[in-house]
Amino acid sequence: MTNVRIGVMHDRDWAPEGLPEFARRAEALGADDVWVVEDLGWNGGVSAAAVALGATERVRVGIGIAPAPLRSPALLAMELATLARVFPGRLVAGIGHGVPEWMAQVGAAADSPLALLEETITSVRALLRGERVELDGREVRLDDVGLVHPPAEVPPVVAGVVRPRSLELSGRAADGTVIAEGHGPSDLANARALITKGGGTPDHTLTVFAFTCVGDDPAEVARALHPHTEGHAAWLGRPQEEVFTVSGPAAQAAERIHELAEAGADTVVLRFAGEQPLRQLEAVLAGL
């Protein structure tokens, strides 16, 4: 198989006190990554990443994703630098637009979401590199700001985006792109073309989230996935049967991961539905 990292998401609906044991067991099973979620009202991404990093020794931990409107770039860079210094080489920082309705709920809607995201990513990356930042942007203003303790090993900053102009932005501003659940191999080809159009180089990484249910009973698998694929079908504007999943018996699920890897995914992050997610992870890793 094409070399691809296998990650697992700690779903936002799972109680946060279960994260340490989940991360430890995922690491013991051989997962490469554990990804945590920051959605309004659920968990804090930086605190969840700290919990997962502290509970493990090897896995990389990804934040998927911090909404730029909720985060001061200076404060976010400070938080990320702390984690990156304590756990060098084990952090990936995802930043995105945030769900517009949620941003409006907390009075954080940006006048220009594109400008805010680009200025946030650009300034956070510069701060993490140890630079002093002067920026009088459309949405972000920093007056000679720098980190006292920048990380020796700078973590990658990736953009969690979907729309064409945002994918182009990711190509020119970020180290990589997080592709949301439901996108299949053809979507990855389209995303890569837009990222390249924006200035992305071949080492710009693609991290793909995927709804996953591993099992031998097709009806049970379909039942577990249905609420997830139904909601995403509406969001993506496509029929529910066209929402890509990593599902079915372990060998079939492994083949779906292979399809994503062949299409350019560097990391596939499995978001499990149904019973016993860690047993499902064990099965798909054995299938690989």
Image: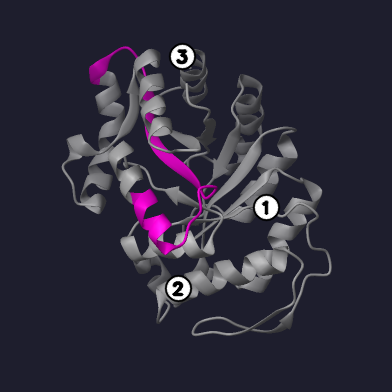
Percent position of residue 190, x then y: 31, 49
Under mark 2, the amino acid is Val
Placement of 273 over or under 228, stated as above or below: above
Q: Which residues are magenta?
A: 191-219
Q: Which mark is residue 106?
A: 2
Residue at 46% from the left image edge and 62% from the top image edge: 199
In magenta segment, residue 208: yes
Q: What residue is shown with label 3?
A: 287
Report if residue 6 is visible in the image: yes
Residue at 50% from the left image edge and 18% from the top image edge: 279
Name the residue nearer the viewer: 164 or 66.
164
Q: What residue is shown with label 1?
A: 155
- Identify the element where label 3 is drawn: helix
Residue extending farthest left = 239
Placement of 157 over or under 104, stated as above or below: above
Instruction: Give how far apart the Cα atoms at labels 3 and 2 are.
Output: 44 Å
Under mark 1, the amino acid is Pro
